[in-house]
Amino acid sequence: MSRGARSDRSQGNRHGFWGRFVRAATNALVAVLFITLSFPSAFAEKGKKAGVASDLREEFRLVVTLNGADPVYVANRVYELGGKAGRHLKNVDEMALELPLGSVPDLAEIEGLEYIAPDRQVTGLASHIEVTTGASQVYPVSGGTLSTLLSLTGLDGSGVAVAILDSGIDADHFDLKDDKGRRHVVLSSDFTGRGGLDDPYGHGTNVAGLIAGDGSSASTIGRDYTGIAPGANLINFKVLDENGRGYVSSVVAAIDQAISLRYYYNIKVINLSLAAPPVDSYVNDPMCKAVERATRAGIVVVAAAGNFGQDSNGKKVYGGITSPGISPSAITVGATNTRGTDVRSDDTVAPYSSRGPTLAHTTDPVTGQVTYDNLVKPDLVAPGTRLVSLERYGNLLVSYYPVLHVDTGNNVNNKSRYMMLTGTSMASGVVSGAVALMMQANPGLTPNQVKAILMYSAQIMPTASPMPCPPARI
C-alpha cells in the first residue's frame, strides 16, 4: 500500500520514484508513483489456468482469489508443491500462501482458482475541520449561542463503529475516551504478526482522532481539535507495523474480519488510509476484491487516493491513484488545502493529491491487448493539509520530525498530545467521519446510496481540473 500521511516538511522535498516509495513509510516523505503497466488477463474461465500477476518475482508470499476452487484442496496442493497456506478468508474468498515461484504454474492449474498475485507491500498515506466541513452543524446542542442553536440534529456518530485498518491506535489517548473514561476503541486486533496493538508509528492514531477524537485535551486552552464524529466507536485493526509497512494479505484478512463482525459491533465504515501500487486491474487486485465484498455486505469503504499528484519537478502527474482507491466500490478521497481557514473560497486541491484516471489494466494473455480501467477518480476531495489530530507519544514520525508535534501547553500527560500531518490519509479520515454521521442519521443507507449522496451534495470546485481531480469537495 502507499503512503497516505506525509509531514508538512516533506512538501518541500516532493516525490521520488517507486524505489523511494517504501522508504517513505519510514521517513514520512512523499514519493512519486512510477506506475508499471503490464499485467495478465482478468478472470480465469472454468477449465483454464488462473490468471497470474505479471510482477511475480522470486518471492514466496502470494494472495490467491478462489472462484469455486475447494480451499482444502488448494491448501493440500500448496503443501505438495513445497509451500504452506493460510486459512480461507471466506467473506472475501481469498487465501494467503507461501510458495516457491517455480511452483506457481502448477498452482495455476487448479480448477476454479481465479487469480494469483504477489502479497505486495502496503504503507500508510500520511482542526478546524468540523467547521469547514459543516460537521459542527449537526452536533448535539449544548448551549444557547447562535452556533449551538444551529446544531439541532444531535448527531455525533454514536452507535456507529468505524474500522480503521492502519498502524494501530493509542486507545488510551484522552480524546478517545468519553467523560466516564470509557474507550471509543471497542476492539483491537493485530494482523501484522508482530504483536502489540498500540501505534508506535503514529499514523493510525492521527487518523483515529480525525474520525472520532473529542478534542477534550485542547478544549481547556481554547483550541478545537475535535474529529468529525466524536461519538463514534472505533475498531482498531493493526495492519501496518512500527515502520508503517504491511502486506496486502493483512489488509484482506482485516476486511474479512470486519465483515464477520459487522453486526456485532455495528461496523458501518472501513477506513483505508493506506495504499499499494496499482499493478492489477481492480477486477483482479486482491484488496479491491475484498473492498467489493465488504461493500456488498453493507459496509461503506473509504480509501485514500494517494499522494502522487506531482513529480520531483513539481509537475502534475495523472494516473497516480493507488490501490485500493482504484476500486469502483470504494469512496476514493483526494485532499484539499483549506489554508487553515473555515471559509471555502480559498480552498484548492492539494498539488500532492493523486489524480485520475486509474491506469491499472489487464492484458490478454493470447493477443497481448491491453485494456485500461480508466475510471474517473478520486470520487471526492476533503481537507487533508496541515490537519492537527492525535499524537501517540514517542511515535516514529514525530521522533524523526519533531516539528510535527503541536504544543498545546497540555503535555504533562503523554495521553493528551497532538501532531500535524498532511495527506490523503487525513482526507480519508474526514470522509469516514462524515459517513459515520450519515449512518447514525439513517442506518438503512446502502454504501452506494452513501456514495451517491456525498457526490451529489458536495460543493463544486470550479478551479479543479475536470478529469484529473473531481470538481466537488466535502
Image (cartoon, rainbow, N blue to C red):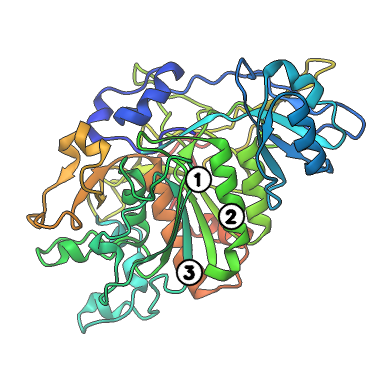
Q: Nearer the viewer, mark 2 or mark 3?
A: 2
Q: Which residue is mark 2?
A: 257
User: Residue 201's x, y, as percent?
Assistant: 32, 40
189 lies left or right of 180: right
Instruction: Identify residue for label 3.
Output: 160
Mark 2 crowdedness (10 Å alpha carbons): few <14, some 14-19, many ≥20:
some
Residue 387 image point, x, y percent: 27, 48
Three-letter amino acid code at disc 1? Phe
N-terminal of the pair, mark 2 or mark 1, is 1
Up the image or down, 398 lies above or below 157; here it is above
| Of pointers 2 and 3, the one earlier in the residue sequence | 3
| Kind of residue at badge 2 | Gln
**Spot occupied by residue 202 in the image (x, y as percentages of width and height):** 30, 43
Q: Which residue is located at x 66 percent, y 49 percent?
A: 292
Work out how far the residue at label 2 is from the one at label 1, CA to CA, in angstroms: 10 Å
* Residue depicted at x 40% and y 39%: 463
Discs 2, 1 touching: Cβ within 8 Å:
yes
Q: Which residue is mark 1?
A: 191
How far apart are the alpha carbons under marks 1 and 3?
23 Å
